[in-house]
Image: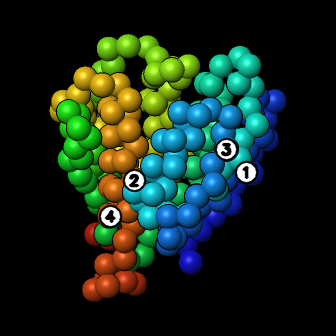
Amino acid sequence: MRKSEIVRKTNETDIRLELSIDGNEKYSIDTGCGFLDHMLELFAKHSGFDLTVVCNGDTKVDYHHTVEDIGICLGKAFSEAVGDMKGIYRYGDIILPMDETLILCAVDISNRFYLNFDVDFDVNKVGDFDVELVEEFMIAFARNASITLHFKKLYGKNIHHIIEGIFKALARTLSKAVAIDAKNADIVPSSKGIL
């Protein structure tokens, strides 16, 4: 079973995160930020991963440290769970609709970090959540997962729908990329022989 547990404690956050990429959409999320809880629940549901997150953060300041540090932990857990990458498809992509919103997402499980986040927001907040934190989360996640990740908003007006589309698209794309290719189950998907 491809899974990982990460415990990370700093002066700003105290996080325990468990991830199984061969899961059954089981999740328990308590980050101290309702909007982030919702996005991570969607992520677990649409990826098929099992995900547990408990975070006690300095939310009296704002949600920045909580969001970034959970991104770090999820990225590390994802990298550990994927392991030596033998047999994975490696690439995944989707164009995901969410009502009036259309989000493109593509990933390469490459062991190389790169993030292209081509998404603009017309407002600064959804409820009490700063929308700029979505990109901060994705930077932290992609860097610590060592993946190449691309997002592009093709259409969208409703900010909640745009962010929800981003998290659902990430989930579906990662699920495709880490699926096992039965024909190549013992092979690293690279001409180099290593990722």
Along the viewing direction, whichever of 40 and 21 lies nearer the viewer: 40
Give the residue pinned by disc 1: 16
Along the viewing direction, whichever of 35 and 121 lies nearer the viewer: 35
Q: Residue at x 45, y 49 (%)?
A: 42
Distance between the alpha carbons at the discs numbered 1 and 2: 20 Å
Distance between the alpha carbons at the discs numbered 3 and 4: 26 Å
Q: Residue at x 24, y 46 (%)?
A: 96
Badge number at residue 171: 2
Pointer 2 local density, CA inside 10 Å: few below 14, some 14–19, many at least 20: many
Along the viewing direction, whichever of 147 and 164 lies nearer the viewer: 164
Distance between the alpha carbons at the discs numbered 4 and 1: 26 Å
Q: Is residue 164 above or below residue 50?
A: above
Distance between the alpha carbons at the discs numbered 1 and 3: 10 Å
Distance between the alpha carbons at the discs numbered 4 and 2: 9 Å
Residue type (three-letter) at the residue carrying disc 4? Lys
Q: Earlier in the sequence, mark 1 or mark 3?
A: 1
